[in-house]
Image (cartoon, helix red, strand yellow):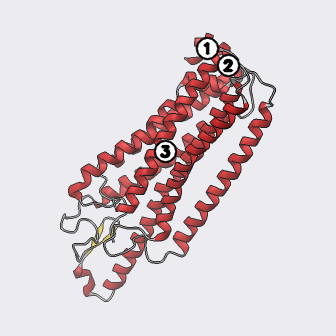
Amino acid sequence: MPLFLANLAMSSYFLALCYMLATVVTITKYWEVRRVLRQHHHMGWSTVQLLILSVALGSLFRTATFSTLCFFDSQNADLPPSSGGVMGGGGSPHSYKYGWLIGPDDGASGSGGSDADRAKKELDFYNKVVAVLFNLPDFLFVSSYLLLVLVWAEAFQSSRRHWFSASDFRRRWMIFYLIFNGLLYLMQLLLYAALFLYDKNGIFKDEKQDRLNLIPEMIFLVVAATDLFLPLIILTTWVYLTLSLSGFPSKSPSARFRLKRVGRLAMAWSVGRILYSVMTVLTFTKGWFNVDRGSASIQSMLLVAVFIAAELIPIYLTLDSRLLAMLSVENYEPLLESSDLFH
């Protein structure tokens, strides 16, 4: 049985460092937003604060995921190429057990078979843990994306002069967010529980080991389907707000500027989530998650490119100090004139 997501070479190290840096910067930006809010006597929780914390949590779990892959790749690095470090299609008599080889000589004693079975069970458990670690941040970034939709909708509504209640609008959106998130995480927990409690055959579907069983495949495809569904929410919300506020004038040029900035950010996140969902579907339907060491460089470069385009660039755009300050304070026009708040 091969390692799940093995042979990622230096991409795991690079992405672990990138997400660690993103976590530190995100937490720093959170405290900057808190400082701006205190200067304007806003002591409660805002949607922007929740967005920043959600991004920080997602980045932290990504760091844990790629750090784990770094550790096990280093354990597997010294294995001979003939065995590939895994029990692959070459039919090597060796099995992998967290960096040790159990060879045919170990089977001379009566405990050889039990050692191999135990190693197989441990490797199967490791593969499931890696699958969960790799998948959990996906749900966190889906939550972040949905919070960004809420931030964009609030900016859209506040950019027009109207008599609708902003607090009622925010409350309805938060109810939708909590219900959607609750159902999403409930489905996630059920799939994780089924993976560890009921899936006794490992995560791979057949001896070729380039396809996943139903439960682990569902874990990844649910996220991909959600990523494709959420841009439809933005489109539906845009149509609704455009029609309902079409007769009301714009508040000010600064209000239009803020809406334009957050609109670009929402577009970047939408493109990133669509790209990530497409790559997820291709990866787990075509068996791209496990490759030979000879193809590891191509897979590693593709992995880094996808995560940079789909998550790291949107995170970088989200953490713009000027944009966060404008979005955090309801009366944001003085912020555009006071550049000291952005330094």
Query: What distance separates the C-alpha of mark 1 from that of mark 3?
Result: 30 Å
The label number, if any, that marks residue 336 in the structure image: 1
Whether the residues at callouts 1 and 3 have beta carbons within 8 Å, the answer is no
Mark 3 residue type: Arg
Horizontal arrangement in the rendering, residue 302 relative to residue 328 (left or right): left
At a point 49% along the width and 56% down the height, the residue shown is 135
Image spot of residue 62 (x, y percent): 47, 48
Residue named by callout 3: 273
Density class for disc 2 (Cα within 10 Å; few <14, some 14-19, many ≥20) is some
Which of the two discs, 2 and 3, sits closer to the camera? 3
The label number, if any, that marks residue 332 in the structure image: 2
Mark 1 residue type: Leu
At a point 47% along the width and 40% down the height, the residue shown is 271
Image quadrant in which you'd find residue 124: bottom left
Q: Earlier in the sequence, mark 1 or mark 3?
A: 3
The label number, if any, that marks residue 76 in the structure image: none
Q: Earlier in the sequence, mark 2 or mark 3?
A: 3
Image spot of residue 232 (x, y percent): 58, 45
Q: Secondary structure at mark 3?
A: helix
Horizontal arrangement in the rendering, residue 246 relative to residue 200 (left or right): right
Which of the two discs, 1 and 3, sits closer to the camera? 3
Image spot of residue 94 (x, y percent): 25, 74
Q: Residue furthest bottom?
A: 110
At a point 50% along the width and 69% down the height, the residue shown is 215
- Image quadrant occupied by the N terminus: bottom left
- Image quadrant occupied by the C terminus: top right
Whether the residues at callouts 1 and 2 have beta carbons within 8 Å, the answer is yes
Image spot of residue 13 (x, y percent): 35, 46
